[in-house]
């Protein structure tokens, strides 16, 4: 039996996240203080008190989600004696969660991860003028059908698979006009529903190239250590440990598809039977059961969750 830790992406943020951890554990408070210092802003105050609109801004949500995930990691390691390298076979994260996974495995320092995610959020937001891009979730079909829908909807514009989340949920991203065509075309291909996503930019598509360029420059100046355990990378859906390959794949991730369904499949194929989502929300734990029904999946985001998980992690 093997375990994996996975880390949530954007959309899992909520006002108040991490507060109970900070109130209960010194190790968690240290994480939030360190992130605040690295960013030169009181991000923890936005996380705990809002307003929600400010927390949801991409440049805030990304480092905030990483901070909560790392608070859980530090609590497990420093206060509960659960060492990541001795406990899990792999780590993985959804989009920005890949940075959380890398920080958890020691590839990035906490401060570098926070600064990179702040920049990543700013660069992704700036890459496309507001209103010119959009994202939509196609429900009831898989990646093969979604790719056909994207190709038909494009009509010379960008429209591509951004997230392959589970066998019946695929997110498309691209130019707004193309995304607006997805609902009708998707219906013709058997999609149950096309759900527009409340995002401020079209993530994980070719329109994000300016953000990819910005991240290439930033990542070139950051030290990446070999992770304590392999990281299953979004864009290749397989395990990587080489720092230079990690650097390259993080740049590719900005414009590339998050192959989450395949990432979870890879974990299961390589012996993982139990998956723990560390951080805010329970999205990935829910997806895991729909991808591989035999996987045990649970979330650790509160002090109660920490205590409940200890017997299974020991």
Image (cartoon, rainbow, N blue to C red):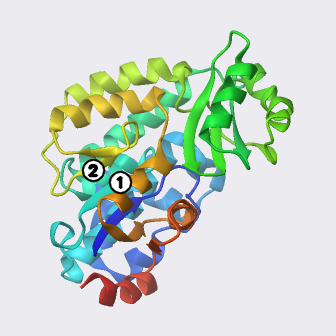
The quarter of the rendered structure image containing the N terminus is: bottom left
Above or below, 80 against 163 in this view is below
Q: Position of residue 93 (x, y in %)?
A: 40, 52
Q: Secondary structure at mark 1?
A: strand
Q: Is residue 223 visible?
A: no
Above or below, 94 against 15 in this view is above
Q: Is residue 309 visible?
A: yes
78 left or right of 191?
Answer: left
217 left or right of 173?
Answer: left
Q: Secondary structure at mark 2?
A: strand
Label 2 sits on residue: 231
Q: Position of residue 59 (x, y in %)?
A: 49, 40
The residue closer to the viewer here, 101 or 217, is: 101
Above or below, 148 against 43 in this view is above
The quarter of the rendered structure image containing the C terminus is: bottom left
Please tell me which of labels 2 and 1 falls first in the chain.
1
Label 2: how many Cα within 10 Å (few below 14, some 14–19, many 20+): many
Is disc 2 in contact with disc 1, using a CB cutoff of under 8 Å?
yes
Q: Residue at x 59, y 21 (%)?
A: 128
The residue closer to the viewer here, 205 or 67, is: 205
Label 1 sits on residue: 92
């Amino acid at each position: 039996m093997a375990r994996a830790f996975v880390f949530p992406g954007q959309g899992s943020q909520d006002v108040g996240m991490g507060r109970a951890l900070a109130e209960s554990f010194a190790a968690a408070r240290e994480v939030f203080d360190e992130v605040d210092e690295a960013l030169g802003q009181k991000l923890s105050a936005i996380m705990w008190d809002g307003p929600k609109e400010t927390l949801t801004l991409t440049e805030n949500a990304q480092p905030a989600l990483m901070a909560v995930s790392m608070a859980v990691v530090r609590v497990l390691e420093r206060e509960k004696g659960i060492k990541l390298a001795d406990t899990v076979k792999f780590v993985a994260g959804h989009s920005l969660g890949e940075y959380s996974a890398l920080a958890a495995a020691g590839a990035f320092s906490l401060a570098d991860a926070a600064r990179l995610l702040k920049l990543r959020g700013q660069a992704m937001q700036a890459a496309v003028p507001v209103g010119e891009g959009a994202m939509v979730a196609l429900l009831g079909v898989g990646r093969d059908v979604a790719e056909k829908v994207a190709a038909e909807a494009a009509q010379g514009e960008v429209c591509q698979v951004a997230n392959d989340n589970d066998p019946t949920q695929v997110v498309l991203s691209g130019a707004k006009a193309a995304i607006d065509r997805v609902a009708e075309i998707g219906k013709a291909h058997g999609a149950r529903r096309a759900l527009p996503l409340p995002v401020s930019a079209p993530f994980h598509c070719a329109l994000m190239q300016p953000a990819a360029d910005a991240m290439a420059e930033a990542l070139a100046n950051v030290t990446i250590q070999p992770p304590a355990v392999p990281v299953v990378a979004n864009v290749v859906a397989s395990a990587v440990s080489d720092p230079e390959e990690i650097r390259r794949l993080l740049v590719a991730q900005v414009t590339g598809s998050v192959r989450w369904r395949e990432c979870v499949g890879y974990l299961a194929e390589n012996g993982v039977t139990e998956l723990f989502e560390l951080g805010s929300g329970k999205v990935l734990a829910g997806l895991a059961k729909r991808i591989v029904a035999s996987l045990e999946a649970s979330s650790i985001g509160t002090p109660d969750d920490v205590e409940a998980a200890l017997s299974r992690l020991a």
